[in-house]
Amino acid sequence: MAWPLDQREQTRQRILDSAARLFALRGFDAVGLDDLMADAGLTRGAFYHHFRTKTEVYDQAIAHAARVGSARLDDLGSQGLGQLIKHYLSREHAEGEALRCPLAFLAADVTHREAAIRGSYTRFFARFVTRLEQDLSGPPEQRRAQALQLATTLIGGVALARALDDEGLAEELLAACRQGAQGLLEEGEDLAAALG
């Protein structure tokens, strides 16, 4: 008997939620299908009703996390980038207690994956940079470089903070990244005001 489409889609979303969280915290190799499905509250057999391979769910979990992150950025509204900087570069995010951005949490893991996965990650990164570029102030010709700098500060700051075993140094790093990212925003606003 076939499941109703809405129930099937809800189950798929549960699997993707679990996959995005577990892959971000542990990486591809450390997450087994049994772990993934248990986390989603399902049996291993249910996996194959939604995905063919672990690689496929990994790829789709990146896209799923990207959609969730984009929706959360939309929810920030006019506070957008300032709030993004504050929350993204927080210790809670770096420790995986808050929303886990796959760009930061999977940066090292993705380098060991096949071309299709790297392609998904690259597309997500490009969309993230474009989104930042749209939200930045300043002359259009400078926004792209500012968006790339901001993306690098956000993603790199969290990825490095996660790798450090010295909490004090990790917090110092995150604080410096917050300051640098905020400086990029202010620089763009100052340029926009000067030209405005």
Image (cartoon, helix red, strand yellow):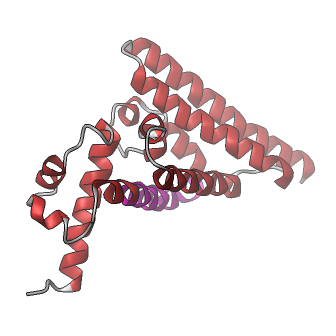
Point out residue 142 in the picture as x, y percentages from the top left corner: 82, 46
Residue 190, quarter of picture: top right
In the image as oriented, which residue stretches furthest toward the front? 114
The quadrant of the image that shows the N terminus is: bottom left
**Residue 64 painted magenta:** yes
Is the stretch drawn in magenta largely helix, strand or loop?
Answer: helix
- Determine whether 141 is above or below 158 in the image: below
| Magenta span of residues | 60-79
Left or right: 141 with respect to 15?
A: right
**Residue 52 painted magenta:** no
Point out residue 109 in the picture as x, y percentages from the top left corner: 41, 37
Q: Is residue 72 visible?
A: yes
The quadrant of the image that shows the C terminus is: bottom right
Left or right: 37 with respect to 90?
A: left
Point out residue 112 in the picture as x, y percentages from the top left corner: 44, 38
Q: Which residue appears at 64% of the width and 51% of the height?
A: 129
Left or right: 124 with respect to 145?
A: left
- Determine whether 38 is above or below 85 in the image: below
In the image as oriented, which residue stretches furthest toward the right? 195
Q: Which residue appears at 49% of the width and 34% of the height?
A: 89
Q: How many marks?
A: 0
Residue 30, quarter of picture: top left
Q: Which residue appears at 45% of the width and 24% of the height?
A: 161
Q: Is residue 97 visible?
A: no
- Determine whether 2 is above or below 72 in the image: below
Left or right: 157 with respect to 22?
A: right
